[in-house]
Amino acid sequence: MTDRGARLPLVPDRYGDAVRARRAELRAARALLLGAHRAELRHCVTASRLAASAELGEALAGLARELRRHVARADRAGRAALPALVGAAVDRLVDRVVVGWGVALLVGLRCVAASRCPPGVPLWPVGTADPVVEVVLRRPSVALPGPDPPAGSARLLLAGMTGGTWRLALLPVAVLPAVGLPAWGGLAVLPPALGIGIALLVAAARAQRVAADQVRLRRWADEVVATVRAALDTELARRAIEVERVAAAELDDLVARRLTRVDAELRALT
C-alpha cells in the first residue's frame, strides 16, 4: 500500500534546465562579441609581424654569408654572374618571408574569427578574393641597387704606379749583383730578368684587380642586404597596418551578424 500522506518526488524540469543552460551559453557568447575581437586582432597582427621580422633577419644573415663566400671563392666569370644570382636569391627570400608571414597571419585571423562567425557561415577569411588575403599574399617588389662598374685597367695601373707596384719589374735586375752579376754588365741575363720582372708586374696587377673586384662586390652585397631589409621592413609594417584596418571592418561585420542572431535567440528564450 502507498502512504497517501507521502510527498511525490519532484519531476526534473528538463526543458527549463535546457533553456537556462542555453541562455547562459548565449550570454557568454555575447560577452565574447563585445569588443574583444579588436584587441585579439591587434595581438595577432603584432605577433605575426615580430615573427616575420625575426625570420627576415635570419634569412638576410644567411644571404650575407653566402654572398661573402661567393665573392671570396668565385673566379672572374663567377663574380660577373653574381648580380643575376643575387636577384634570383632575393626573389626567393622575399617569397619565403612574405608567404610565411601571410600563412601564419591568416591562421591567426581564422582563430580570432572562429568563435565569432555565425553558424553556417564559412570560416573567415575565405578564398584568395577576400580583401585581407589579397593584402597579405600580394608579392612585393624590391628594387636592388646595381653594383659599381669594375675599375678599368688604366685606373688600376695608375693605382699600382702610385702604390709602388712598378718596383716589382726592377726586382730581378736588382737581384743580379747578389748572384755575382752586374746589373747592367750581364747583358745575357738582362732580358730574362726583365721578362721575369714584367711577369711579376702582370701577376701583381691581376691580383690587384681581383682584390679591387672583391672589395667592390662586398660593398655592393652589403648595400643589397641593407636595401632588402629596409624595403621588407617597411612593406611588412605597411601591410600590417592595412591588414588590421581591413580585417577589423570584416570582423566587425561578422560580429554584428552574430550579435543579431544571439540577441534574437535570447529574446525567443525569454
Image (cartoon, rainbow, N blue to C red):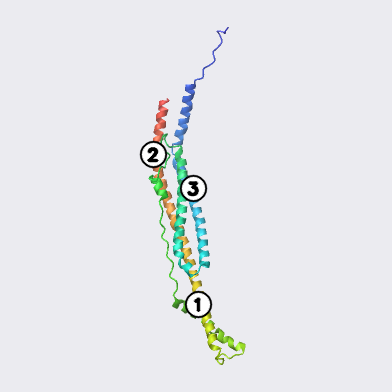
Mark 3: secondary structure? helix
Q: Amino acid at mark 3?
A: Ala
Q: What quarter of the picture does the C terminus occupy?
A: top left
Tag nearer the camera, 1 or 2: 1
Pointer 1 with pointer 3, Cβ within 8 A: no
156 relative to 141, above or below = below
| Residue nearest the observer in this picture, 31 or 250 | 250
The residue depicted at 50 percent of the width and 56 percent of the height is: 59
Report which residue position mark 1 lands on. Answer: 205
Q: What quarter of the picture does the N terminus occupy?
A: top right
The residue depicted at 61 percent of the width and 87 percent of the height is: 179
The reply to whether residue 167 is in sight is no
Report which residue position mark 3 lands on. Answer: 47
Mark 1: secondary structure? helix
Mark before the other along the chain sequence, 1 or 2: 1
Q: Amino acid at mark 1?
A: Ala
Question: Dot 2, how many residues are within 10 Å of its Cα: few (below 14), some (14-19), or many (20+)?
Answer: few
Mark 2: secondary structure? helix
Name the spot of residue 181 as percent of width and height, x first: 59, 90
| Residue nearest the observer in this picture, 3 or 85 | 85
Pointer 2 with pointer 3, Cβ within 8 A: no
Tell me which corner region of the image, top left, top right, bottom left or bottom right, holds residue 188: bottom right
Name the spot of residue 117 as percent of width and height, x first: 42, 37
Tag nearer the camera, 1 or 3: 1
Give the Cα distance between marks 1 and 3.
54 Å
Numbered-mark total:
3
Mark identifier at residue 253 = 2
Mark before the other along the chain sequence, 1 or 3: 3
163 relative to 123, above or below = below
Q: Amino acid at mark 2?
A: Asp
The reply to whether residue 62 is in sight is yes
